[in-house]
Image: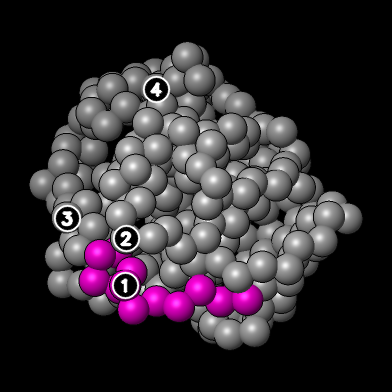
Amino acid sequence: MLKKVLFVINPVSGVHHKMKSQVAELAPDVMNPAAFEVEIVFTTHVGHATELAQRAVEQHFSVVVAVGGDGSINEIARVLVDTPVALAIIPLGSGNGLAHFLKIPFNVKQALQVIANNHLVKVDTVMLNEEFFVSVAGIGFDALVARRFATEGRRGFLTYLKVVVREYFLYRPKKYHIVADGVEIVTRALFITFANSDQFGYKTTISPTADICDGKVDICIVQKVPFWRIPQLAWMVYSRRVDRSKYVQIIKASEATIERKKGKYLNLDGEPLKFAKALNLKVKPASLNIIVPDTF
């Protein structure tokens, strides 16, 4: 029986717009028509990817391919949780944090070959109140950056860096009350990231020990760093040693509650959302099938 594969292409995500046309051109060649029945759809509005993924589940597709970034992945994956339909990724978004973590090739033809090889792993997903994420979520400065970045006319790392630098010096740490698997912490923090994978994107590693298959999420509490310490912390982020910084505390937990005095926004897989001040977090172990390279 042919495997039915739906490619969902977000035409506006990221900065790789020309490469998205390559997917439609190369998919029929790489995906052997004797083994795969391929359908390609470009999204036209917010939420369209979710609608398409729901149709794919109802029509018994084998795979839904997210062609875009972490936000596009989230829109599709939320429907595929606890179903036999697998998620695949062609990373053509901005930060592409989950794709970096899963070692998915950024070359379109190579990414298509990974899908054709069909190496599946079951990964954890995380519920945050009534919302869902696969890679990372965050509050505080993290959410502010996601919100500001979303309003920028241009995408890409330089724009992201500009937003971080512009907002950092004015931002005042907020107070948080955290209970994670029975451990209670009251602290002020620059931001708190809930890391199911290890990074935000652009290879900015927030939790080097994060494991998407361990039934835990890494709660990363980051203090505001003095100005003269910023280069050192940046080096630790990019060398995957940020967990050794005295300004970073990481707790692994399967469930947690977080209360904040101020702040309305949340960064959810790179997308800013308005959210309640009280957060309830719960990991859903082995709840999503993802196609990854056999080296992952």
SS state under label 4:
helix
Q: Which residue is mark 4?
A: 114
Question: Mark 1 and mark 2 in contact (Cβ < 8 Å)?
Answer: yes
Circle 2: residue type: Phe
What residue is shown with label 1? 169
| Left or right placement of residue 43 versus residue 76 in this view | left
Residue ID at (25%, 60%)? 160
Residue positioned most to the right: 182
For the residues labelled 2 and 3, the Cα–Cα distance comes to 20 Å
Secondary structure under badge 3? helix
Residue 158 got which mark? 3
Residue with the mark numbered 2: 227
The residue at 48%/57% (across/down) is 269
- Closer to the chain start, of discs 2 and 3, is 3
- Say whether residue 186 is magenta: no
Q: Are marks 3 and 1 in contact (CB under 8 Å)?
A: no
The kind of secondary structure element at disc 2 is: helix
Q: Position of residue 116 (x, y in %)?
A: 41, 22
Amino acid type of disc 4? Val
